[in-house]
Amino acid sequence: MLGSVTLSIPVLADGKRLAPGTYQVRLTEEVAKPGVGQSPNAERYVEFVRGGSVAARELATVIGPEGDPTANSRAPTGDRVRVERLRGGDYVRVRIDHGGRSYLIHMPPASISGPGGR
């Protein structure tokens, strides 16, 4: 388990709508195919769990040991979770600092009318 995240607005994760609320975020063993010059562990899948069931999964960028060595960021020194709406409101960023690594998850807000609509 990486941490507990509280979303204040609905977002889309892997095409699925996540309602506002609190989710446990856990790291999976599945990694994304690395891009040219990218570390094999630079992106990992995480799952959003609520009520014991996986509600959605999404790709997380890993910064720190075994993550992206080209990232211009120091390894975090403690465990913390931060959820913020990025400028312009086009994305919600979840940053989880855990075990000397940072996991960045970017998700677009979901409209009230359904996935993909505004």
Image (cartoon, rainbow, N blue to C red):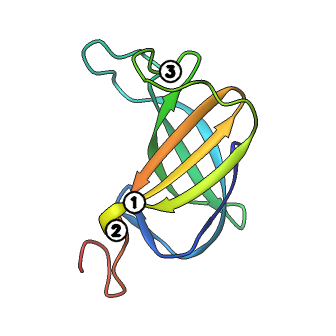
Please tell me whether residue 5 is drawn above or below residue 117 in the rendered image: above
Q: Residue at x 23, y 78 (%)?
A: 117
Give residue 72's position: percent from left, percent from top.
Answer: 44, 24
* Cα–Cα gap, marks 1 and 3: 23 Å
Look at label 1 and name its amino acid: Leu
Is residue 90 at least partly visible in the picture?
no
Callout 2: 10 Å neighbours few (<14), some, many (20+)?
A: few
Please tell me whether residue 79 is drawn above or below residue 22 in the rendered image: above
Read off the residue under disc 3.
67
Quarter holding the C terminus is bottom left
Look at label 3 and name its amino acid: Gly
Read off the residue under disc 2.
89
| Residue 86 quadrant | bottom left
| Of marks 3 and 2, the one in the foreground | 2
Q: Residue at x 40, y 57 (%)?
A: 107
Read off the residue under disc 1.
86
Q: Residue at x 43, y 68 (%)?
A: 11
Give residue 45's position: percent from left, percent from top.
Answer: 49, 39
Left or right of 34 in this view: 22: right
Q: Residue at x 41, y 51 (%)?
A: 106
- For the residue labelled by badge 1, is the local secondary structure a helix, a strand or a loop? loop
| Residue 88 quadrant | bottom left
Kindly give the residue lying farthest to the right in the view shown. 78
Please tell me whether residue 89 is drawn above or below residue 2 in the rendered image: below
* Cα–Cα gap, marks 3 and 2: 27 Å
Name the residue nearer the viewer: 91 or 49.
91
- For the residue labelled by badge 3, is the local secondary structure a helix, a strand or a loop? loop
Give residue 70's position: percent from left, percent from top.
Answer: 39, 17
| Of marks 1 and 3, the one in the foreground | 1
Look at label 2 and name its amino acid: Gly
